[in-house]
Image (spheres, rainbow, N blue to C red):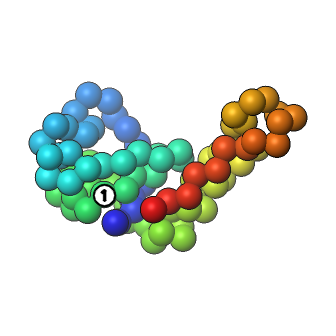
Amino acid sequence: MAYYTAINTGKGFITHTDNELAHVAGYPGDVWGTTNTSWATRVGADSKTKSQAQTIVDASISGSYYLNGPDSGSQVVVTLP
């Protein structure tokens, strides 16, 4: 799995053909995971290491999202595969 950052530009950002070649998974912070290098090139995505990508994901959700309210202790955690 390779990780990238790219801004989702809407329709056509990820096409059916892109996902047929290799699934493109979206994560918080405009982080994308895929083995589809053609997609990454087409959208101008910036390559990131897994550690860099995880740092971006963590920062984008840090203290912002809770499953059952801010006092529940159930902050959302996303761990990249």
> From the viewer's perspective, is 62 left or right of 9?
right
Give me the residue at 73% from left, 43% from top. Answer: 75
Q: Quadrant of residue 65?
A: top right
Residue 76: x and y, percent? 66, 44
Name the residue: 16% across, 37% down: 16
7 displayed left or right of 67: left
Where residue 9 appears, as percent x and y from the top left, is 34, 34
Where residue 53 sits: x, y (%)?
51, 62
**Is residue 11 or residue 68 the one in the foreground?**
68
In the image, taking residue 44 as reference, residue 30 lies left or right, namely right
Q: Does residue 50 appear left or right of residue 62 in this picture? A: left
The kind of secondary structure element at disc 1 is strand
In this view of the protein, can residue 6 be seen by the observer? no
Task: Report crowding for label 1: few under 14, some 14 to 19, many 20 or more residues within 10 A (C-alpha).
Answer: some
Q: Residue sitting at 47 percent across and 47 percent down? A: 27
* Residue at the far right in the pictured view: 71
Q: In the rendered structure, which amino acid carries the disc numbered 1? A: Thr
- Image quadrant occupied by the C terminus: bottom left
Looking at the image, which residue is at 69% across and 34% down?
67
Quadrant of the snapshot with the N terminus:
bottom left
The residue indicated by pointer 1 is 34
